[in-house]
Amino acid sequence: MVKIYLGIHAGHNASAALMVNGSIVIAVQEERFSKLKNHGGYPKQSIDFCLNYAKENGLQINKIGFSTTNLSAFWAAYPIHHYYNMKDYHNHYGSEFYGPKLQGKDVTSYYEKIISEKDKNRANSYLPFDKFESTEEMLNNTGKFRQVLTEFVCEQSGVGIENVVFLDHHTCHAFYAYFGSERKADNCIVITMDSIGDDLNLTVWNFSNGKAEKLRSTGQCDIGRIYKITTLLLGMKPDEHEFKVMGMDPYAKSEYVDVVYNDVYESLLKVEDALVIHKHRPADMYAYLMEKLKPYRFDNIAGAVQKFVEVLTTELFQQAHKITGLRDFCISGGVSMNIKMNMILSELDIVDSLQVPASGSDESLAMGACYYLNGFNSNHLPNTYLGNEITQDTIDAELSQYFPENSCRIEKNVSHRTVAEMIASGKIIAAVRGREEFGARALGNRSILASPNDPEVIKTINEVIKNRDFWMPFALSILEDFTEDYFVNPKQIQSKYMTLGFKTKDQNYSRIKAGTHPYDRTCRPQFISKTGNPEYYDLVKEYYAITGTPALLNTSLNLHGNPICSSLEDVSHTFFNSSLEYVYLNDSYLISKKLV
């Protein structure tokens, strides 16, 4: 019997995934359809995408799993992150909402304000929220919201109500951590960490002998929340720009970092019995950090909060090893997106291997739900090329519409060799092929590519294409056969998804420096295999034949603040709204702008 599961994450960075006989065949994020970064709410278009695939292939869905049980209808109806600016976030965490709420004061007026601003939210919520009789019911009656979700998805999919289930948030994270990429060992410690999900923010598991045993869990691990608030206090958007804080960390001097860490962060949390729990945590974390961080400089704050994460998770890993005896680790949840932390953890003596699958934040919960439903008969995820496909039929139908002849020059049958020669000569080229990548990292199918040995290219990409912050590093795609020549990796840890940091080796650093962090020379590489993406592998191999460097600088194809491009229309929008000169489409078409 064919088993077909549909996984749904109806929250921040909403998504849907389809599993057929133990393998994920579709995984898509709602942001790619709505064009709203980190789209929150019900992922109707993502679900439709999965349903269309099932229909086209004659598949009948057996069960639907939502990836969280304790969902709030109010925040699904009014996802404030779609339109909140920095002032709004400070008011949210400070004087208008959390501040008075923590003091037991009535915050009804705040909810009313959000409702009155509903026109600012450009997302279609789809769900019949008029079934709720009051704001209080929308906030607190999670059972009724599950009923609303069930009825809506059943009408949308044709699946019976009896075949819709709601699954624990962190269990979905854990199953994705385990199956999300190829493991070195079957018996693993699995750790999930995030801001909050079903009242927990840390779980520790023993995945061994075909069973998953939850050993520890807590809602006191506020690592993610503290990092989020620090991000806001540094002038960046919470739940989106935490990676910018991590990128700033290497610029700080350790002696100044230690002062901030000891004064502000060290006293907040502790690790005890393989759990991160409260030490001397203040009730109002925003007010505490706002006041305590006032004397300190931005770079030293970034360094201190990063040290805070690394110290706590190091001790957590050591204690988890002590209680299980296991030396192979898998991690997921929003905190797992911290690639510098992952580098520190991978280097620990008690760690033989560390698996960090792509985009462990909440968007991957839809896949985790599928893995949870299917259990240990599931297959590991071989790659993340799981979304919308730009086919030859798509090109035939849409190319002239989105890349008109009066604006573009289009050459056909352009070889990898020609494109590699252009990159070697200093050109910056967008590579677009086949199915889009799932998650936060472009891995060759929706990427901007450039020579990795020329630091000047960083300035060009930042200023005329991406509008990125000047201190943020780019990433590197490298042929897996050559990684030992460039990275310190004695444990042979795999890095297919840019989820781990590595120290670089001095002898070849000049060849790849534009694809590394310019200050500490670390790198978050994508190891490319011929089986994983043969076309991309061949393009990089041609560049290697020309230059002797088996790698390319790789950054995602999108405008700053927008989702990664999905459709040909998205590619066209990015092309004409930036100074990008070339698009290499489906390993054949070279599109360039005509000079006016």
Image: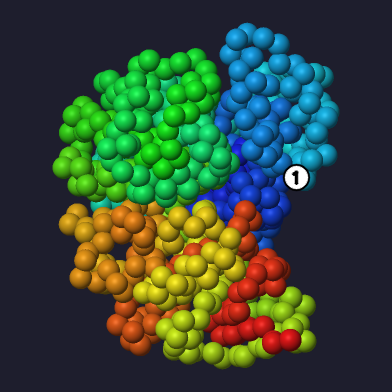
| Residue 409 position within the rendered picture, expressed as x and y whole percent measured from the top left | 67, 88
Number of marks in the rendered image:
1
Q: Quadrant of residue 85?
A: top right
Give the quadrant of the C terminus: bottom right
Q: Is residue 112 above or below residue 12?
A: above
Q: Residues within 10 Å of mark 1 (few under 14, many from 20)?
A: many
Q: Amino acid at mark 1?
A: Ala
| Residue 335 position within the rendered picture, expressed as x and y whole percent measured from the top left | 42, 39
Residue pictured at 83% horizontal, 39% vertical = 119
| Residue 270 position within the rendered picture, expressed as x and y whole percent measured from the top left | 31, 22
Q: Is residue 586 above or below residue 214?
A: below
Q: Is residue 336 above or below residue 52?
A: above
- Residue 354 shown left or right of residue 70 in the figure: left
Q: Is residue 178 visible?
A: no
Residue pictured at 43% horizontal, 80% vertical = 539
| Residue 260 position within the rendered picture, expressed as x and y whole percent measured from the top left | 36, 31
| SS assignment at label 1 | loop
Q: Nearer the viewer, residue 154 or 334?
A: 334
Dot 1 corresponds to which residue?
A: 123
Q: Quadrant of residue 204?
A: top left
Q: Nearer the viewer, residue 76 or 405?
A: 405
- How is the structure coloured here? rainbow
Question: Which residue occupies the extreme front position in the image?
Answer: 295
Residue pictured at 61% horizontal, 79% vertical = 581
Residue pictured at 45% horizontal, 44% vertical = 245
Q: Is residue 43 visible?
A: yes
Question: Which residue occupies the extreme top position in the image?
Answer: 104
